[in-house]
Each structure stands twice: as structure tokens, then as C-alpha cells.
Amino acid sequence: MREKITQQTRELQQSNGGHIFYEYESIEAYVRNTVSYIIAGIEQGDHVVVIENDRVYPLIHRELGKELNSDDMKKVHRVNNFDFYCFKGDFNSETVISYFKKFVEPFIENSISIRTWAHVEWADKEQITYYVGEYEKEVDQTVIDFGLTTVCAYDKSRVPVHLRETLLSCHRYYMTDDEVLGISEDYQIMQKIG
């Protein structure tokens, strides 16, 4: 899988970025794929912003420590995903997008190439699926505007069918624990409509 991630992200980097929906089922595969994405980014000259929770990040950090030297580890920038998505107490797409832009703009202004990996989580609320969908639509435009490559990772067991459909329509690429697939058919349809 590491070769697939490296190849796909190299292609995305050359084509002005991309927005990837990663639907994971296995936490072990999730950690492996996150590490592969980070290493591919560093090998391609990027800094990597990792938006992750306090339970999973230590697993990622430990695996990175086995493969990266201290200079490379300085290129990994971790943001707690709860702080990121609930910046003002709840998941508000406008607030999260504003926070995201403020976080990545210094890299862009200083011509530092970056990519992001975001583990999107939320409390069990019915309305949250609407807000997540609206947020992802805005992220897609931001990714295009900034020319970023970003992965938005979701636990498959927590994604209802209607949210999955929305996520497929606002991410150019789709990824599972074992595959990195090309441009999403749903995304292409939405681009023609929109």
C-alpha cells in the first residue's frame, strides 16, 4: 500500500493537489496508511500537518520514530482533532474552515510545501452529518485554491449512508485500507452540476 500512496500523492502533487476521502475499517491499517502518507510527503519535500486524536497519534508517532530522523520529524505538525473540529465548542463548518486556512496560510506564504491528513470525528449527534458535509464541500474548494493534497479519514462504522454519499461527491479521490482509487464518479458528476 505504501507504494500506491507514494505514487498517487506524487501524481496529485504534480497536478496541483487533491482531496482524498479515506474510509477505514482497521485501526492497524489506518496507522500504517497514515505513516505511509507522512513518509511519502517528507520524501517529496513536504511538511505534513496531521490532525489526529490523542488515542491514535501516539501509535503513529511511534511508527514514524522507527523510520524518520529528528530533522524529518520536525516536518510533522500535529494538531489535536478535537481542538481543531470543536474549536469553539462545536463542529461549525465556517469556524473549522477559518481555522484551517489560518493554520496553513503561514506555510503557503513562506513557500513551504505542505500536505494534510485529517481524522474527522464528532460526537454522536444527528445534525452533525449535515455540518460535516458542508465542511467537506468547503474544504474541497480550499484544497483546490491552495493546491494542497489532503486526506480526510473517517471510521466507516460511523459514517451513515447519506453522509458517505455526500463525502464521495466532494472528494476527488477515494481510499480504503487497501486501495487508492482514481477520481470519484460521484465527484465528477457534482463538478458538472455545480
Image (cartoon, rainbow, N blue to C red):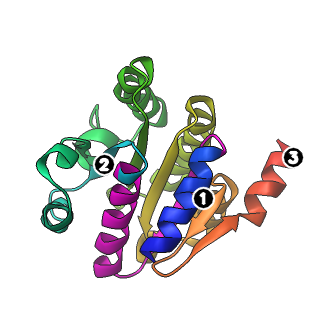
Image quadrant in which the N terminus is located: bottom left
Name the residue carrying label 3.
Answer: 193
Q: Are marks 1 and 2 in contact (CB under 8 Å)?
A: no
60 or 23: nearer the viewer: 60
Disc 1 on helix, strand or loop?
A: helix
Q: Percent position (x, y) of residue 70?
A: 12, 48
For residue 127, say whether it is visible: no
Q: Amino acid at mark 2?
A: Ile
Check residue 51 in the rendering and tell me which mark sits there, or answer none.
2
Q: Percent position (x, y) of residue 18?
A: 60, 48
102 or 72: nearer the viewer: 72
51 or 17: nearer the viewer: 17
Name the residue carrying label 1.
Answer: 167
For residue 94, say whether it is visible: yes
Q: Residue at x 87, y 46 (%)?
A: 193
Instruction: Say which quarter of the image contains residue 68.
Output: bottom left
Q: Are marks 3 and 1 in contact (CB under 8 Å)?
A: no
Q: Percent position (x, y) of residue 136?
A: 55, 46
